[in-house]
Image (spheres, rainbow, N blue to C red):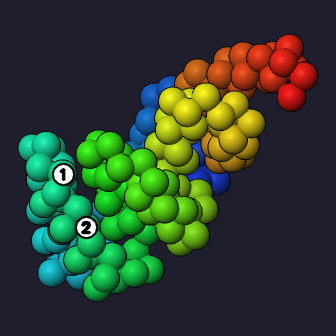
Amino acid sequence: MSTLDELFVRLREATTPIEIETLQSGIWQLWLTTGELLLDKHLEAGMRALSAGNYTQAITDFTTLTELKPAYAEGWNKRATAYYLRGEYRASLADIRETLRREPRHFGALSGWASMLRTLADDQGLLRVLVKLEQLCPHWPGLQGQLRELRNRLNESGE
């Protein structure tokens, strides 16, 4: 099994969508393991609740996870997702920041952040986040087109 660092090096070099997707899946596999049975159970329960649309229960499970293992980035990321789906964007952004403090390469958190910035029409913030994604994986499907369009829009508006 590859280490997380090795997978990220390979992700940066990946050029095809299938290769990128395979590497991302490998990274998610590592991220979705706490290394502790009790914590894995909270993670699994929270993910089931999230899939079922029970965001309150998911937030409860992910909160327990972040309290028991605050260094575990994925607990914060999953709770950010639950907050986002419940429409609590400030709480979601706060948890995205916590996720990125623990794992600055967390493309899931960056992608979620980009979605919120797009919704808020914060083009400058969106550009900063997309550039971070580009540093992780320059050939991320659709990313270069998004960056080109965003930079054109910013240049036209004089920002």
Would residue 101 be found to the left or right of residue 29 on screen? right
Bin the neighbour count of mark 2 within 10 Å (Cα to Cα): few under 14, some 14-19, many 20 and up: many
Quarter holding the C terminus is: top right
Look at the picture and state if 16 lies above or below 20. Answer: above
Residue 47 image offset from top left, x and y in percent: 18, 55
Q: Give me the residue at 15% from left, 81% from top.
A: 38
Q: In the image shown, does 130 or 55 lie closer to the viewer? A: 55
Q: Give me the residue at 44% from left, 36% from top.
A: 21
Quarter holding the N terminus is: bottom left
Q: Which residue is mark 2?
A: 62
Bin the neighbour count of mark 1 within 10 Å (Cα to Cα): few under 14, some 14-19, many 20 and up: many
Would residue 101 be found to the left or right of residue 69 on screen? right
Q: Secondary structure at mark 1?
A: helix
- Disc 2 + disc 1, Cβ < 8 Å: no
**Of label 2 and label 1, which has the lower sequence position?**
1
Q: Which residue is mark 1?
A: 55
Q: Give me the residue at 25% from left, 67% from top.
A: 62
Q: Check the image and name the residue furthest to the bottom.
A: 68
Q: How many numbered marks are there?
A: 2
Residue 98 image offset from top left, x and y in percent: 50, 68
Q: Amino acid at mark 2?
A: Phe
Residue 9 image offset from top left, x and y in percent: 64, 53
Would residue 40 be found to the left or right of residue 119 on screen? left
Q: Amino acid at mark 1?
A: Tyr
Q: Nearer the viewer, mark 2 or mark 1?
A: 1
Q: Give me the residue at 69% from left, 41% from top.
A: 125
Q: Secondary structure at mark 2?
A: helix
Residue 15 image offset from top left, x and y in percent: 62, 30
Q: In the image shown, does 79 or 40 lie closer to the viewer? A: 79
Q: Quadrant of residue 45?
A: bottom left
Q: Quadrant of residue 133?
A: top right
